[in-house]
Image (cartoon, rainbow, N blue to C red):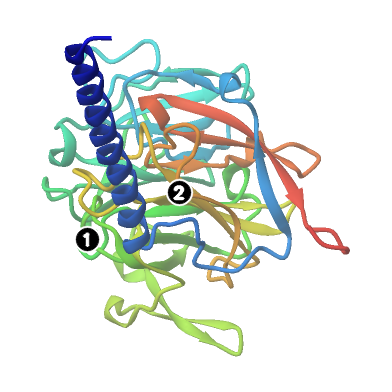
Amino acid sequence: MTCDKRFQMRRGAVRFQRVSRFLAGLVLLFVLTDFVNGEEAVPPYPPSPVIAGLGWAPLDTVVRQARDGDNWPLTWADDDALYTTFGDGTGFPPKSKRKLSCGFARIAGGPGDFVGVNVPSNGEQLGDGRRGKKGSGLLSVAGVLYLWLDHVDGQGSGAQLAWSTDHARTWTFADWRLDEFGFVGFVNFGRNYQDARDDFVYAYSHDGPQAHTPADRFILMRAPKSRLTERSSWEFYTGSVDGQPKWSPDAGRREGVFTNPGSCLRSAMTYQPSLRRYLWWQQIPQPIGHPDRADTRFEGGFAVYDAPEPWGPWTTAYFTPRWDAGPGEHGDFPTKWAGADGKTLHLVFSGEDYFSVRRATIRLVTSSGP
């Protein structure tokens, strides 16, 4: 071997070592960044006393429809269909001829053979990104659909209520809004609210005005189901005394029902009657320094917490800072698609910018342990 060839080989080896050290440094940087930001795989709440974990169907079984949309809040209506909204997309066939900030769709069938159809509506919204209103929560009560909209100030902040008496074709918009909150959702209780715990409707939000900015806690509010459209009927959770929740019409007195500093953002809560538990899907925001901490459509993680009441006490049923798919910024467990055995759920999420559905199997805690 010539000296020149040996020199070239040594130079190549040095380059390889430098590249290897650089890549190793990047990996360490990402690990340390996640650790510093509190986003390592350590849940903020203890394990669930009921749910030992969730097992997911293989990735290639995920059903994906309605490409190019996100934000898919769901509710099970009186006509036995699921209703949803989509953001920054064209929805299901017949697809919208223009990209909508908020569009509406009706979904019939089961989790493996559902058919989604767009619902043309006067409630459709235009405006890309933070400039257009988007749906963050849907609820059916006595045949009326109620909708929380976010981005109501055209800059990503605030929430506004709307309602429809004809299954999303026409909407009436409240003349008031909640400037304190950026991504409000409803607690869903079965078909047309039939499994509700009482005569109130419950709603939640991360405690901040911006839909894209994480907060330190989540808050809870409620209103009588017969007076949802009145701002004066809404009251806010202010803590519990001897296990009993306290409420006030003054939003300034609100207290958190869930605390996770810097990591409370978008979420969805559903009551699962077979478990007698509330399941709260929560997005885990991207690390600090990410260009959009709320964007987990293509990578990122989420958690599922459970509790006997919507105000807690909360425990951890599932937690992953990085899933094997992009979980999206909204995940929902519609009770219509829950198995009769009480151990099967289907997560609807906005991963890969689709209406995505994946089966989950619940592992229950037994008397002898998980």
Q: Residues within 10 Å of mark 2 (few under 14, many from 20)?
A: some
- The residue lying toward the viewer, choosing from 210 and 99, is 210
Q: Is residue 189 left or right of residue 370?
A: left
Q: Position of residue 306 (x, y in %)?
A: 61, 60
- In the displayed structure, 341 sits above or below 246; it is above
Disc 2 designates what residue?
321
For residue 12, what is the image quadrant? Answer: top left
Q: Is residue 57 visible?
A: yes
Q: Is residue 80 visible?
A: no
Disc 1 designates what residue?
209
**First in residue order: circle 1 vs circle 2:** 1
- The residue lying toward the viewer, choosing from 286 and 175, is 286
Secondary structure under badge 2? Answer: loop
- The residue lying toward the viewer, choosing from 213 and 28, is 28
* Residue appearing at x 67%, y 59% in the figure: 277
- The residue lying toward the viewer, choosing from 85 and 286, is 286
- In the displayed structure, 62 sits above or below 264; it is above
Q: Position of residue 69 (x, y in %)?
A: 33, 26
* Residue appearing at x 62%, y 21% in the figure: 109
Q: Amino acid at mark 2?
A: Pro
